């Protein structure tokens, strides 16, 4: 994937806030734990309606993580890329947003 980005001309560096990065990693850990719980629910033949509710909660948590990453990318990565003269970062971000949506 890194080679793909180089071939497309995306070379900006990423500047992430360490505290936000830690929050995102913690969110991922909670999501993984929640997914493990869903797996156990299915293994234990728990009610399908309850499983679907839990899947909905994971989907919501993933959407929240996505929003946090978008905000972080705009706040730090895009800002720094533009300051570094890398206007292609905006096009790359637009493409990523389209795929995300």
Image: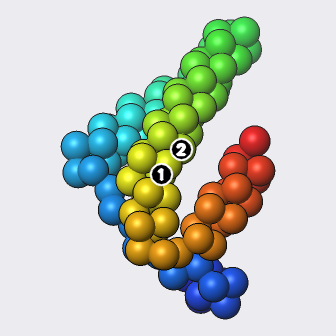
Nearer-the-camera pick, 38 or 92: 92
Q: Mark 2 points at which residue?
A: 70
Q: In this view, does 60 lie above or below 32?
A: above
Q: In this view, does 33 lie above or below 101?
A: above
> Badge 1, how many Cα within 10 Å: few under 14, some, many 20+?
some
Q: In which quarter of the image is residue 28?
A: top left
- For the C terminus, give its image quadrant: top right
Q: Where is residue 7 in the image (x, y as percent from the top left)?
A: 67, 90
Residue under numbered circle 1: 73
SS at circle 1: helix
Q: Residue 59, located in which quarter of the rendered image?
A: top right
User: Residue 24: x percent and y percent?
Assistant: 37, 41
Residue at horizontal 27 percent and vertical 50 percent from the top: 17
Q: Describe residue 6's horizontal placement relative to residue 83 as left or right.
A: right
Residue 99 is tagged as none
Q: Is residue 10 visible?
A: yes
Q: In this view, does 96 lie to the left or right of 37?
A: right
Q: Is residue 19 above or below residue 95?
A: above
Q: In this view, does 33 lie to the left or right of 95?
A: left
Residue name at image x 51 percent, y 81 percent? 11
Left or right side of 69 for 47: right
**Residue at 69% across / 84% down in the picture?**
8
Proximity of marks 2 and 1: CB atoms separated by less than 8 Å: yes
Decide which of 47, 16 is in the foreground and name it: 16
Farthest residue to the left: give it.
Answer: 19
Q: How is the image coloured?
A: rainbow
> Would you say residue 69 is visible in this rendering?
no
């Amino acid at each position: 994937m890194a080679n793909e980005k180089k071939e497309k001309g995306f070379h900006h560096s990423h500047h992430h806030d360490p505290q936000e990065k830690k929050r995102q990693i913690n969110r991922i850990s909670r999501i993984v734990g929640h997914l493990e719980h869903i797996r156990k629910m299915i293994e234990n033949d728990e009610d399908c309606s309850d499983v679907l509710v839990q899947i909905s909660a994971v989907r919501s948590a993933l959407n929240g993580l996505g929003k946090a990453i978008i905000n972080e990318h705009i706040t730090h990565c895009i800002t720094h890329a533009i300051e570094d003269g890398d206007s292609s970062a905006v096009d790359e971000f637009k493409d990523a947003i389209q795929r995300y949506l």
